[in-house]
Amino acid sequence: MKFADLLSSKAVKAVTSASSKKRLMHDIADVAESAYGISAQRAVEALLERESLGPTGVGHGVALPHARLDGVETVVGVFILLEKPIDFEAVDRQPVDVIFALFAPEDAGVEHLKALALVSRTLRDPGFCAKLRANPDPITLHTIITEAAVVQAA
């Protein structure tokens, strides 16, 4: 699995401000709707439902919200870079500014887990996250994400 398979260039956004975790979920859902045709309302509901099971802020300013949805054909991602970090109830209690959300088919099984592992492994690299934070242009962000994963896979 590669980032190029997960992340459309239309699904990358730099957001100047998100007032809350819930507002951020709406931003993610809006991007998912415009990039993949996923219902924004269903996406928000699924993300918030998953978040109620436990926060998906994994630490070091990174969050990996994810949800399974009927009607989604394949695992897809949305990347958001926040100009100003927000509280996300992360495991290390640090605010979050790098967000990679995943949407998977209801029956995705192992593909969803592989995608989550790829994203988690990649965003665990502090140097990689620093590079993302230094480049708020969506086209540049998409290039960094898709090329870095190819380099790591080699």
Image (cartoon, helix red, strand yellow):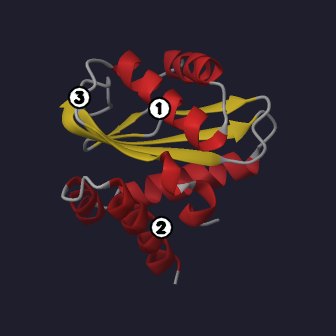
Residue 94 visible in the displayed image: no
When asked about the image quadrant of residue 117, the answer is bottom right
Q: Position of residue 111 (x, y in %)?
A: 72, 52
Q: CA distance from mark 2 to mark 1?
A: 19 Å
How many marks the image carries: the answer is 3
Please say if the residues under marks 3 and 2 sit with CB atoms less than 8 Å apart: no
Q: Residues within 10 Å of mark 3 (few under 14, many from 20)?
A: some
Q: 121 left or right of 3? A: left
Which secondary structure, mark 1? Answer: helix
Q: Earlier in the sequence, mark 3 or mark 1?
A: 3
* 18 horizontally vs 47: left or right: left
Q: Position of residue 9 (x, y in %)?
A: 50, 56
User: Which image quarter is the N terminus in?
Assistant: bottom right
Residue 111's place in the image compared with 53, above or below, is below
Q: Dot 3 lies on which element?
A: loop
- Residue 38, position as x, y percentages in the image: 66, 32
Q: Quadrant of residue 98?
A: top left
Q: Nearer the viewer, residue 29 or 102?
A: 29
Q: Amino acid at mark 1?
A: Ile
Q: Position of residue 20 (x, y in %)?
A: 30, 18
Mark 3 or mark 2, whichever is nearer to me: 3
Which disc number belongs to residue 91?
none
Q: Which residue is mark 1?
A: 28
Q: CA distance from mark 3 to mark 1?
A: 13 Å
The residue at which mark 3 appears reads as 17
User: What amino acid is labelled 3 in the image?
Assistant: Ser
Residue at 50% x, 44% y is 78
Closer to the chain start, of discs 3 and 2, is: 3
Contact check, label 3 and label 1, Cβ < 8 Å: no
Q: Is residue 93 left or right of residue 152?
A: left
Q: Which residue is mark 2?
A: 146
